[in-house]
Every structure is written in structure tokens, then in C-alpha cells.
Amino acid sequence: MRAAVIVFPGSNCDRDMAVALKAAGADVQMVWHKDADLPQGLDLVAIPGGFSFGDYLRCGAIAARSPICKAVIGHVERGGYALGVCNGFQVLTETGLLPGALMRNAGLKFICKTVALKVETAASAFTNSYKAGDVVQYPVAHHDGNYTTDAETLAMLQGDDRVAFTYQNNPNGSIADIAGVLSENRRVLGMMPHPERAVDAGHGATDGQALFRGLLSELTAA
Amino acid sequence: MKARVHVMLKAGVLDPQGAAVQHALGSLGFDGVQGVRQGKVIELELAQGTTEATIGEMCEKLLANTVIESYKIEVL
């Protein structure tokens, strides 16, 4: 599997993401936000966490209009896979590749801790190594993770089995406890918690390994 | 020419920051503050003749996230 990790000014989980993908067996390239093209033959684009462009205007808003994001949109429109974590999720909603928006946490505080998540669906390349109903531990570290949509979009996400993860104890006020959502073709996942920070015994949890392993097995077989 | 864009959360979207400001006003002794909504004001310096339609496009494409925000354009 060939993967690219996008690097914006202010990204701070880009190397963690690359390490997690490499540990699972992916061939990983880092791509700078000013590049207009992605490498040829790419299977997955990963948009990492951080504070791209200082969260100016809105989290992810400036990054979503950067040259590389045009290429990311093209990649997704051609049926390519994309994973956005934390700021990466914010960028994906700002590009319109995923529905909804991420607002300031309901408690207004930055939250940095490990949380329990329920895997809501195993029907995606990202979650096929889990079983629906599994509870996993991933860290969260965000100020703006309060996912919101209108009622119609929420009903569509739930009806189409597009909620990938929910919080067991909602830390940020997200609607319907949503922690991660899938695109209509199930090839784009955006989530606030950090699977790439739970892939090594030194991290304190390894529950994130299965996400990358699942991705590798599905995309390598394809 | 100048224009001012007001960006506000749409009605019905919960505004945790506005709620915190409302709470703080109450704790300062200002009674009767029945609601606070917090938004942004963006001032633009523009080439003469820039149309309101163009400013609207700026709002739609970048200045506001129309999933949760509405905007109002004021040409000065």
C-alpha cells in the first residue's frame, strides 16, 4: 500500500502518522501543502493532527484551501482512500469531503486524555479488523472536537451506517456522541481521536494498530 | 472600497462560547442577560468596483463555514 501524509505548517502528528503507517507495512511519503500534486499510484492520503495555519479563521479552514487539498479532493473523487485525524478531520469537513463541522468543545476546555470509543461499524477498510460493538482506547487532544450536523444529515449518517466510532463518555458535546464518520463510499474516515498515538506499547495502548492493519490488508489485497 | 463581513453561528447551532460569556456577565452582576451569541467581524479592503456578488463568493468559499455559520455583508 502506498500512502502519503500531508504536512501543513502547524501539523504536529504528521510523523506519528507516518510511523504508524510504516509499522503496519505501508510505503509512506510526506507531501508538503504547497505541492499541487500527490505522488502517482497512491492508495491512501492521511491528513494528520495539529494546528494547521494556527487554526486561523476556523480549524482546518485555510488548510482545506491549500494547493494540495485540490489534489486530495481529486484523489477522493477518483475513489482513493483518505484518513483525517483530529485537525485532519477538521480539514476534511472544511473541504466538504465529509459532512458536518467541528465546533469548540462544549466545556470550552482543551481535552487531552485517553478515551473509550465504541466501534459502530466494521464495514470499512478502516474498521474491518474490529467487530461492531468493540470498545477501544484512543487518546484525544483537541479544543474543537464538538461534531455537529443538522438533523437530516445525522439521520442519513446513522441510517447509512456511516458513524464509525462513538464516545463511551462524550467529552466534547459531539452530537450523538460521534467521534468519527465515513464518507458515502466508506473510503474516507475522519475522526477526532488519535489511532496513530495508540500503536506502540510505549504509547500506553496499542488499540490503534488494528485500524492500520485493517487498512493495509484491504488496500494491499486490492 | 471597504466591506465588512459579519459571521455568526446559525440560529439553532449551540454556541458554547456565547453561553460562557453569558454566564460570566451574570457572575459580574449583570442581571437579565437572556442570551449571548458570539461571532466574527472581518474587514476587507477591496479594489474599487468589487461587487457584492464577489464578496458573497468569498464568504461562501472561505470566510464562513455555511454548514454552521451565516454571514452578512456590509459595503462601507
Image (spheres, coloured by chain):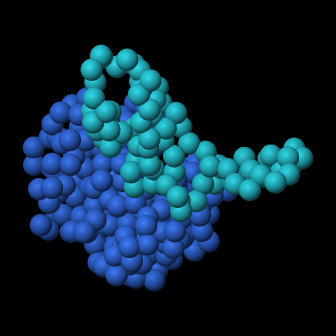
Chain colours: A blue, B cyan
Q: Quadrant of residue A24?
A: bottom left
Left or right: where B66 falls relative to A108:
left
Rendered location of residue A172, percent (x, y): 60, 60
Answer above or below: position of A33 versus A97. Answer: above
The furthest residue to the right: B29
Q: Quadrant of residue B75?
A: top left
* Residue plotted at (18% across, 33% down): A36
Rendered location of residue B28, percent (x, y): 87, 44
Total marks in image: 0
- Quarter of the image that includes the N terminus of chain A: bottom left
Q: Is residue B22 visible?
A: yes
Rendered location of residue B64, percent (x, y): 41, 43
- Quarter of the image that includes the C terminus of chain A: bottom left
* Residue plotted at (25% across, 41% down): A69
Q: Is residue A163 visible?
A: no
* Residue plotted at (52% across, 68% down): A175
Left or right: where A150 falls relative to A113:
left
Q: Quadrant of residue B46?
A: top left
* Residue plotted at (23% across, 34% down): A67
Rendered location of residue A59, percent (x, y): 46, 43
Left or right: where B33 falls relative to A39:
right
Answer above or below: position of A182 versus B60. Answer: below
